Image (tube, coloured by chain):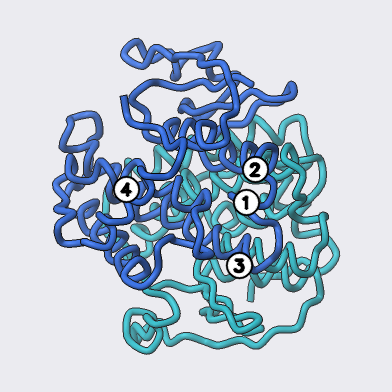
Chain colours: A cyan, B blue
Amino acid sequence: MKLYMTENSGNAFKVRILLSLLDVPFEKALVDFPNKEHKKEPFLKLNPRGQVPVLEAEGKVFWDSTSNLVYVARKHGGEKWLPTDPLGMAEVTQWLALSNNEIHYGLQWARGVKRGIKQGNFEEYQGYGRQGLAVMEGRLKTHEWLALDRPTIADIACYPYVASAPEGGFDLNEYPSVAAWLKRCEALPGWLKRG
Amino acid sequence: MKLYMTENSGNAFKVRILLSLLDVPFEKALVDFPNKEHKKEPFLKLNPRGQVPVLEAEGKVFWDSTSNLVYVARKHGGEKWLPTDPLGMAEVTQWLALSNNEIHYGLQWARGVKRGIKQGNFEEYQGYGRQGLAVMEGRLKTHEWLALDRPTIADIACYPYVASAPEGGFDLNEYPSVAAWLKRCEALPGWLKRG
């Protein structure tokens, strides 16, 4: 199994966290981000969307962090990190949606603007991001984990860009249950620390 | 099973297509969109994100079209519309990611600006949308369906906002394989026609 990634990519970090939790060996294929290797051939043959992560496994290639998480969870995690019963899978998936929406074009994009690597409407992204954090705070006030009362790929998918939200101008002191959940994630055996 | 929806919501339409394909009866709960019922209590108790669709099933409530598709596919569709083997599920999921990214904040948002229901950077959304259509065109030039060489929830999730892309200023004549795929979707027995 080979993971195309950069050390800084939060989306690739999601996949690396799960691989670490499950203690699955893999080969790192480091993509030269400053030289935009991910926007050129031959990388675009692997992922026409021009993004990391990309996972190569069993002769197949999958782009997108959620598909990578799904592959690793189903292949190596049994029913634990992504259950296949209708209710359980739907509950995990609704939080994956938050990671793909408010967290992505809220927290991640606001941070991108602050760091000068993305153009766009900072106030708009801040609004989406605060809405995402408020939804998480509502859930985590009364639950330890986002879905199913146990850690799942929902927590992993939401973690990186919530953890780095302060770099996008968000104050996590306003979301104490979210801040406590970040620490709970980091305390899981095998959780990967950011380099 | 009850689906909170509006007749115009493309995201709710995804769920209605799958329910129609599988011939599953459900109750429509029409949300008063002009009066912003979805942004107020008690709707926000069902979905703190303030959006449709929301699915109520087996005493649980799931927000987000992808989670709704996952629930219906797993509950009523066996392995057909969303397989649970690692490779199959990952392949479907990578196209769900396109629907959650380039299609959502490309095609859907550009159309929203054109229709005056969303503010934002039209050129930026057009760029994302064209990228998403190009990725689909690349796949559909040589395949009938987005994933697995059969129709899955990947096709359903991508369909509505690709079908309505011309209202966002996109010319589907530039993407002939995508246009042919739209017709292939519509020819599936049980496919739901837009009202």
For marks 3 and 4, the one nearer the N-term is 3
Q: Chain of mark 2?
A: B
Q: Secondary structure at mark 1?
A: loop
Name the residue type under label 3: Asn
Mark pair 1, 4: CA separation: 42 Å
User: Of residues A144 and A59, which is closer to you in this image?
Assistant: A59
Tag 2 near tag 1, CB within 8 Å: yes
Tell me which corner region of the image, top left, top right, bottom left or bottom right, holds residue A80.
bottom right
Mark pair 4, 2: CA separation: 42 Å
Residue shown at 76% from the left, 73% from the top: A20
- Provide the residue designation for mark 2: B77
Name the residue type under label 1: Lys
Name the residue type under label 4: Phe
Q: Chain of mark 3?
A: A
User: Which is in the foreground here, disc 4 or disc 2?
Assistant: 2
Q: Do marks 1 and 3 both belong to one polypeptide chain? A: no
- Provide the residue designation for mark 3: A68
Tag 1 near tag 4, CB within 8 Å: no
Tag 3 near tag 2, CB within 8 Å: no
Mark pair 1, 3: CA separation: 21 Å
Mark pair 3, 4: CA separation: 29 Å
Q: Secondary structure at mark 3?
A: helix
- Provide the residue designation for mark 1: B80
User: Of residues B151 and A118, which is closer to you in this image?
Assistant: B151
Mark drawn on residue A122: 4
Q: Secondary structure at mark 2?
A: loop
